[in-house]
C-alpha cells in the first residue's frame, strides 16, 4: 500500500455537507497539515478573519485568475 502526501488543500466556504470553515476547524489540530487556501466568493471580513484564525494560509476570491492561483500554490508549497 502506498501513502499519499497532500501538498495543498483548496476549500470553498460553500461546500455541500460541511462548509470550508467547518472543515478548517476539523483540520486545525492536525499535525503537519498542508497549507490551506480558501477559494470562494465570500469576502466578509469577519469570515476571512475566522478562516485565518482556524489556519487558512490564503484567501482568494472567485472569479479567480488561474495564474494567480498557481503562483499562490507555488509560494505555499515551495
Image (cartoon, helix red, strand yellow):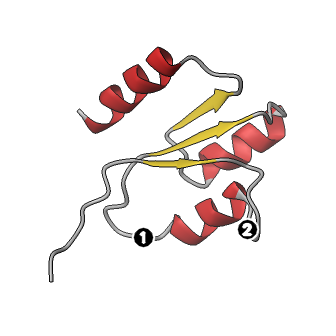
Secondary structure, mark 2, is: loop
Residue at position x 47%, y 70% in the image = 29
Q: Is residue 34 left or right of residue 63?
A: left
Q: Earlier in the sequence, mark 2 or mark 1?
A: 2
Q: Is residue 21 left or right of residue 26?
A: right
Instruction: Answer with the quarter of the image where residue 77 lies.
Output: top left
Q: Residues within 10 Å of mark 1 (few under 14, many from 20)?
A: few
| Viewer-closest of 10 and 54 | 10
Q: Quadrant of the C terminus?
A: top left
Residue at position x 15%, y 83% in the image = 1
Residue at position x 40%, y 25% in the image = 70
Badge 2 vs badge 1, beta-carbon distance below 8 Å: no
| Viewer-closest of 12 and 45 | 12
Residue at position x 73%, y 57% in the image = 15
Q: Would you place residue 9 above or below residue 32 in this image?
A: above
Secondary structure, mark 1, is: loop
Instruction: Answer with the quarter of the image where residue 63 lies.
Output: top right
Nearer the observer: mark 2 or 1; the answer is 2
Numbered circles on residues, count: 2
Q: Would you place residue 55 above or below residue 72 in this image?
A: below
Q: Residues within 10 Å of mark 2 (few under 14, many from 20)?
A: few
Where residue 41 appears, as percent x and y from the top left, is 78, 33
Q: Is residue 77 left or right of residue 66?
A: left
Where residue 46 appears, as percent x and y from the top left, is 82, 40
> Residue placed farthest to the bottom in the image?
1
Q: Which residue, given by chain and number where applicable, does mark 1 sit on?
A: 30
**Measured Cα–Cα span from mark 2 to mark 1:** 18 Å
The label shown at residue 39 is none
The label shown at residue 18 is 2
Amino acid at each position: 500500500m502506498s501513502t499519499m502526501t497532500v501538498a495543498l488543500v483548496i476549500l470553498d466556504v460553500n461546500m455541500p455537507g460541511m462548509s470550508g470553515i467547518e472543515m478548517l476547524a476539523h483540520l486545525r489540530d492536525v499535525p503537519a497539515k498542508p497549507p490551506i487556501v480558501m477559494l470562494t466568493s465570500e469576502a466578509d471580513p469577519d469570515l476571512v478573519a475566522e478562516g485565518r484564525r482556524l489556519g487558512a494560509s490564503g484567501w482568494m476570491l472567485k472569479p479567480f485568475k488561474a495564474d494567480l492561483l498557481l503562483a499562490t500554490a507555488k509560494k505555499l508549497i515551495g
